[in-house]
Image (cartoon, grey):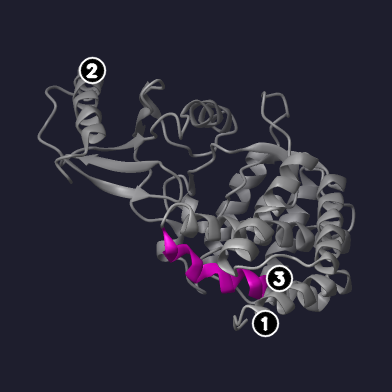
Amino acid sequence: MPDHDVRLQHLTVWLDEQLDGLYRDNGWGEVPQGTLSAASSDASFRRYFRWASQARSFVVMDAPPPQENCRPFVDIDHLLATADVNVPVIHAQDLERGFLLLGDLGRQTYLDIIDSDNAESLFSDAIDALLAFQRLPMEAPLPSYDVALLRRELELFPEWYVGRELGTTLSETQQATWQRVSQMLIDSALAQPKVLVHRDYMPRNLMYSEPNPGVLDFQDAVYGPVTYDITCLFKDAFLSWPQARVEAWLRDYWQKAKAIGIPVQADFEAFQRASDLMGVQRHLKVIGIFARICHRDGKPRYLADVPRFFAYIDEVAGRRGELEELRQLIAELQAAAGVRS
């Protein structure tokens, strides 16, 4: 790790102090020799380190203010724990400096290990965890997925993907099409029953753990559309599944949700349409975010996954006639910019 990483030096001093206290309070004896290594980073400014000795390991979150705020992570961690969801134990925190010492949920994400053979079992566990936190009463002071948030997310697509990645702007006719499609997606999302929404409930943020899964990256949770997280689980940024399997998993979730009183749509066809349109809203948002990460933050690797999201949109538009003009709009924009879909 670079010598000039002053923040890491401060984190290391803080970590040593916290480990001393943790070992002393738990009667574990002296803190043994351990190693600190990079655990992961993500598309934000957060990064994670793993401290490991022969007997124990912990994860340290570094979330530098003012770009990041640890408080929502702490609050939602505690909230999810009340539903018996396997989230990291918070052993120590310094919210002012953006340091957290967390329990270690393991080294393997779902994304690391999932394949066509084990997907059934892994997704079954993920659905059970999702249903557990969707049953929580909506009493925490969380934001709602309202018109402003949905529209702000959608506008990332014309601003960053069309404007910065394709280097063009929407014509007056295209802008009118975009507004019609956006309004339809927003109206569909707002018409759905509300539950607690993780907002990034996908294999990269689920750890193969005991109990399974360990759930991470929940700090942006809101109250919002019931189909959001289950759609996100199967329409992932990093791997895709055949539509027939996705539909079977969606139906399994819908039946379980109905059985325990989660407020899903009354019939599966209505639920699936809501899921399809919710997915398209998210896909457009993520395409915009990946373009922004490239052009604003200098991380171009995320753009490699953009075609996957266009493929999701194309597949859904093939089944949903109301999305045909979105498909045509995307084709026009990409053709004009010389992009192969």
The magenta region covers 299-313
Left or right: residue 63 compared with residue 251: left
Q: If you read the primary sequence from the N terminus, does the residue marked by circle 3 or circle 1 appear first?
A: 3
Q: Under tag 2, what secondary structure?
A: helix
Q: Which of disc 1 and disc 2 is earlier in sequence?
A: 2
Tell me the amino acid under the disc marked 2: Gly
Distance from Cα at disc 3 to Cα at disc 1: 17 Å
Between residue 208 and residue 67, name the one nearer to us. 67
Quickly name the residue at label 1.
335
Residue 313: assigned label: 3
Disc 1 residue type?
A: Ala
Q: Is residue 309 magenta?
A: yes
Left/right placement of residue 95 relative to residue 137 reads: left
Cα–Cα gap, marks 2 and 3: 51 Å
Which label number is shown at residue 247? none
Q: Residues within 10 Å of mark 3 (few under 14, many from 20)?
A: many
Question: Residue 74's x, y, as percent?
Answer: 49, 27
Q: As drawn, is 125 to the left or to the right of 297? A: right
Any part of residue 195 in sight: yes
- Mark 2 vs 3: CB contact within 8 A: no
Residue that carries the numbered disc 2 in the rendered image: 21
Residue at 45%, 51% (x, y): give it: 43
Question: How crowded is the residue under tag 1: few (<14 C-alpha within 10 Å), some, or many (20+)?
Answer: few
Marks 2 and 1: CB-CB under 8 Å?
A: no
Question: Mark 2 or 3, which is nearer the eye?
Answer: 3
Q: Where is residue 299? Give x, y as percent.
A: 41, 58
Quadrant containing the C terminus in the rendered view: bottom right
**Could you say whether the residue bearing mark 1 is in a helix, strand or loop?**
helix
* Residue placed most toward the observer, 243 or 17: 17
